Amino acid sequence: MDFIFLEEIDSTNKYAKDNIALISDGTIVYTDKQTAGRGRLNRKWVDMGKDNIYASLVLKPSDTMLAVYSNLTQLLCLVLCQTFEEYGVIPKIKWPNDIQINGKKISGILAEAVIAENSLKGIVLGFGINLNTSSEVLSEIDQPATSLNVETGKTIDKKEFLDKLTAKFFLLYNKFIEDGFLLIREDYIRRAGFLNKEITVKVLNEKLFGLATDITPNGALKLLDKDNKEHILLIGDIL
Ligand code: BTN
């Protein structure tokens, strides 16, 4: 596992994608200042200072795309939760890979695949973590957000957090590629804050409303709509 530290960059995901051929498998690119961070649903990821995490994990499992690779964000989401728990907080997953504490967002993941000439060059798992940001600064974000230092009352060491997180990720990674989401399903479900609740999910340009009933063995969300029709969603975002 290697680390590439950049003092300032537009986006660690963009840097990782642009330099994918030069970055080795298992590298974490991270920065102190991200000037054009991007999130899911075309949102921005706001830079809230150097003591937070803006990072991208580069993986090169094979040169063809396998279905299990789309579950890697869920593996990262689980190990993020387990790392937060080491600091004594109780994180909840908002499917597929947002993390909240007391209903407030603390971390998000943006996964991107680099494909060229019909071959997979790499997978970039970008993640932002609010580690050390005051409630005043957090209140300027357009959605409820929190940080680990607000939740614990302690200053969090950024490199220490990244080391704990990546160690947990690579402990499970090889087996996860072999076994798939089933390897972590129970641990994931235990932290799922959305199950048995009525939710709205944005799937491409459509919105679906219903009861979140389960997570399937391959990580999809089961949603029961008002006509009792079951939807199995492999992609989407809970709004
Ligand atoms: C989301 O919740 O919408 C995903 C946010 C992902 C943000 C991270 S910060 C590091 C990496 N570089 C980016 O431009 N985005 C991701």
Image (cartoon, helix red, strand yellow):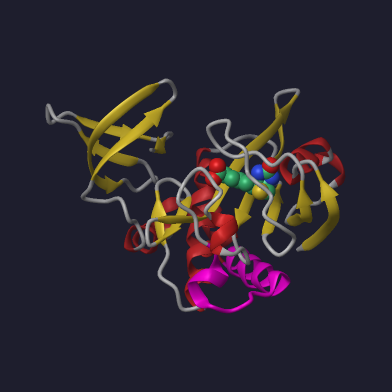
| Front residue (pair 194, 44) | 44
Magenta residue check for 159: yes
Q: Furthest-top residue in view?
A: 205
Which residue sits at x=17%, y=28%? Answer: 229
Q: Quadrant of residue 232?
A: top left
| Front residue (pair 129, 82) | 129
Magenta residue check for 186: no
Which residue sits at x=50%, y=60%? Answer: 146
Where the C terminus falls, by quadrant? Answer: top left
Where the N terminus falls, by quadrant? Answer: bottom right
Measuring from the top left, give residue 44's x and y in whole percent. Answer: 62, 38
Measuring from the top left, give residue 204's x and y in whole percent. Answer: 44, 24
Q: Quadrant of ligand 1?
A: top right
From which residue to which does the magenta span run? 147-171
Residue 145 position (above or below residue 16): below
Measuring from the top left, give residue 20's x and y in whole percent. Answer: 80, 40
Residue 42 position (above or below residue 195): above
Measuring from the top left, give residue 157's x and y in whole percent. Answer: 69, 75
Main secondary structure along the magenta-highlighted residues: helix
Which residue sits at x=34%, y=48%? Answer: 217
Q: Quadrant of residue 40?
A: top right
**Lateral position of residue 8 relative to residue 116, left or right:** right
Q: Furthest-front residue in view?
A: 136
Instruction: Report how many numbered discs are placed on residues in the image.
Output: 0
Res 125 visible:
no
